[in-house]
Image (cartoon, rainbow, N blue to C red):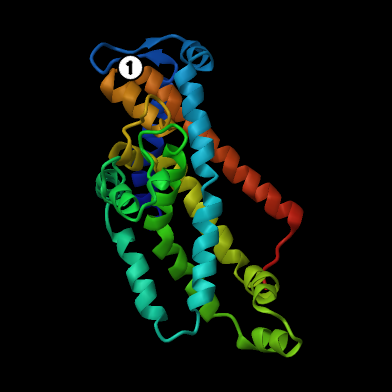
């Protein structure tokens, strides 16, 4: 108990106490200057009828679906480079973006993806004018573009995790499958996929928690919520309401909804795992 006590005290001070205050402020009107005033469920009633909030939830859900790309691509890349001589070099190159802050990456891509930016200019130079798009200024393209940028930035971490999982996989399974005449896609689906199931669940858990609660630096660096509210997410709406307009009570209510969304997603993942059963080798 003596060894655990310092950690418990730190958790109470820096984690649970702020969460408790967040829950309290969510039921008040508070601007950071005047004392908070209790308003009950008024903040949540306002959120239920606020179009910007519903748009933020929808955008967050769409971006969260990007985990299919953020998990699938690193898995395939790790399998493709596994056992090759250049694997270490490729992994190192892919991991470099993970060392950069999300805000810096977002700012850089904001310049690269501008309507007159290098990508569109290169497409026009190749005679592919129809492919040149206002990537971050179009309601149609802004969310897929953000998903693609995050995929580029998180690719290296996912590849490293899957490569570690592949390194621990016995080659006997692969050799036996090859002897039986298995093709590459059959190896991927029947050998690598179930063998890397624990890695996939771990990576999916990190992405689910990280993206829902950490879209803010990406949105701030890339679009600042635009065009209009087309890329506003829950955590960015917290920033808009709490910092830009000083409605800290409303921002706390939005943040509390975000915490509940993460909790629901984690429960769904646990239930799905219980229903399907463990496929760990």
**Label 1: which secondary element:** loop
Q: Is residue 200 left or right of residue 37?
A: right
Q: Nearer the viewer, residue 138 or 216?
A: 138
Q: Is residue 108 above or below residue 250?
A: below
Could you say which quadrant of the image residue 19 lies in? top left
Could you say which quadrant of the image residue 145 lies in? top left
Q: Is residue 53 above or below residue 38?
A: below
Q: Is residue 257 visible?
A: no
Quadrant containing the N terminus is bottom left
Where is residue 211? Give x, y as percent: 44, 45
Q: Which residue sits at x=43%, y=20%?
A: 26
Q: Is residue 142 above or below residue 78?
A: above
Quadrant containing the C terminus is bottom right
Q: Is residue 7 above or below residue 14?
A: below
Neighbour class for label 1 at 10 Å: few (<14), some, many (≥20)?
A: some
Q: Is residue 185 visible?
A: yes
Where is residue 186? Give x, y as percent: 70, 74
Q: Nearer the viewer, residue 250 or 154?
A: 154
Q: Which residue sits at x=69%, y=79%?
A: 183
Q: Is residue 265 left or right of residue 105?
A: right
Q: Nearer the viewer, residue 240 or 230?
A: 230
Q: Which residue sits at x=28%, y=43%?
A: 110
Where is residue 271? Give x, y as percent: 69, 47
Where is residue 178? Give x, y as percent: 69, 87
Residue for badge 1: 247
């Amino acid at each position: 108990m003596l060894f655990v006590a310092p950690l418990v005290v730190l958790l109470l001070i820096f984690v649970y106490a702020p969460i408790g205050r967040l829950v309290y402020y969510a039921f008040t009107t508070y601007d950071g200057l005047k004392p908070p005033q209790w308003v009950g469920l008024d903040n949540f009633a306002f959120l239920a009828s606020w179009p910007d909030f519903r748009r933020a939830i929808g955008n967050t859900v769409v971006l969260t679906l990007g985990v299919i790309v953020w998990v699938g691509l690193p898995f395939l890349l790790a399998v493709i480079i596994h056992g090759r001589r250049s694997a270490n070099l490729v992994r190192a190159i892919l991991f470099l973006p993970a060392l950069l802050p999300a805000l810096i990456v977002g700012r850089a891509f904001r310049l690269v993806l501008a309507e007159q930016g290098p990508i569109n200019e290169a497409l026009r130079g190749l005679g592919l004018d129809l492919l040149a798009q206002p990537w971050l200024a179009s309601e149609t393209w802004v969310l897929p573009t953000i998903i693609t940028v995050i995929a580029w930035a998180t690719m290296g971490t996912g590849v490293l995790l899957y490569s570690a999982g592949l390194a621990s996989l016995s080659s006997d399974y692969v050799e036996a499958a090859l002897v039986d005449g298995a093709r590459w896609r059959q190896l991927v689906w029947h050998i690598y996929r179930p063998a890397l199931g624990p890695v996939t669940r771990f990576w999916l858990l990190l992405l689910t928690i990280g993206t829902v609660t950490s879209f803010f630096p990406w949105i701030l660096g890339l679009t600042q919520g635009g065009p209009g509210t087309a890329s506003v997410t829950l955590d960015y709406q917290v920033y808009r309401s709490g910092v830009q307009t000083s409605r800290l009570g409303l921002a706390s209510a939005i943040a509390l909804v975000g915490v509940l969304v993460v909790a629901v997603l984690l429960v769904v993942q646990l239930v799905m795992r219980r229903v399907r059963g463990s496929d760990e080798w």
